[in-house]
Image: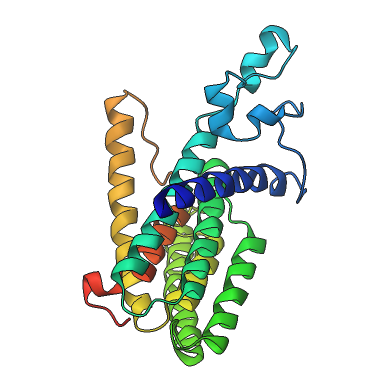
Amino acid sequence: MDTVLHLLAGILLGGSVNSLADNLTQGRVLARPRYSDGTARPPLAWLGLGAFLFNRRLPPDNGNEGSAHKLSWRYPLVELALAGLLLAANQAALTGAEVAPGQQVLWQAYGCVFVLLAVVDIERKRILLLPVIAASLLALFAAATFPQYTPGLSSSLAGGVVGGSVFGLVYIGGRVYGRIRGRTRELPTAFGKGDIYVMAMGGLIVGFPNVLAAIVLAVFLGGAGALAFLLGTRRRGGRIRRFAALPYGPYILAATYFVMLFPSAIGLHT
């Protein structure tokens, strides 16, 4: 029964994350779910899974032009992904020692923010600052109020400083290298400013020294993701552009989430 409840909660929260991903990038916060042409989606299509199951992917009465505004696979995948994250958080709570209910709620809130940030970064190659700030403040509040099951305030602050500083130095180094190498035009860097903010947020959440493992894991995942992108592009016969800008935020978020849930799996402080 507990598994079913977490699945349902994850799907419903995934629908909310999908709506926020659409609205925040359009300058809105709360609005009825819509197709890409602005048409309001019927209740059966408010969730991506509902739209796919009940054949509501297309706007009603939109003729042949509706195919261009068909709901993408992103919608049900986000709902299923968030359901999976909630199940992972529940499993971590069941196997962990003295995990309080409040800790699980924090994990679930972070999961929603992480998926939202990842979706927007993948689709638009930008980091939304509002969710980053909200999660950072939540991490500091939790560290100051519930130090018994989260990193203490000093650990959280140190993690944020270290995470932001390490990625900030890499960003600056990349900018300098890009200017020297680009000569007439500045080359893109591996990390953007948004990635610095995301890593600082991750450091606040997992604390120090756990942030060091999150950094190493993020770099490893980013390298593996870049290699998979290059191999996939070559396999499809596409043209590989040098210094192509790839979204790095999802790898930072994945690394942070893993370190947050399973620190003992890699011998970290819990």
Q: Is residue 105 left or right of residue 19?
A: left
Furthest-top residue in this view: 64
Total marks in image: 0
Residue 247 seen in render: no
Q: Is residue 136 left or right of residue 216?
A: right
Q: Quadrant of residue 244?
A: top left
Task: Give the x, y percent position of residue 204.
Answer: 49, 78
The residue drawn where x is 55% and y is 81% is 142
Q: Which of the pair 173/25 is nearer the observer?
A: 25
State whether residue 56 is above or below residue 249: above
Q: Quadrant of residue 36?
A: top right
Q: Quadrant of residue 181?
A: bottom left
Q: Which of the pair 5/54 is nearer the observer?
A: 5
State whether residue 229 is above or below residue 224: above
Q: How is the image coloured?
A: rainbow
State whether residue 156 is above or below residue 54: below
The residue drawn where x is 75% and y is 11% is 61
Point out the image quarter for the C terminus. bottom left
Residue 37 seen in render: yes
Q: Is residue 34 left or right of residue 266?
A: right
Task: Give the x, y percent position of residue 175.
Answer: 48, 63
Q: Which of the pair 266/149 is nearer the observer?
A: 149
Furthest-front residue in this view: 1
The residue drawn where x is 36% and y is 26% is 238
Q: Is residue 22 left or right of residue 146?
A: right
The residue drawn where x is 63% and y is 69% is 133
Task: Give the x, y percent position of residue 137.
Answer: 62, 76
Task: Give the x, y percent position of residue 68.
Answer: 63, 18
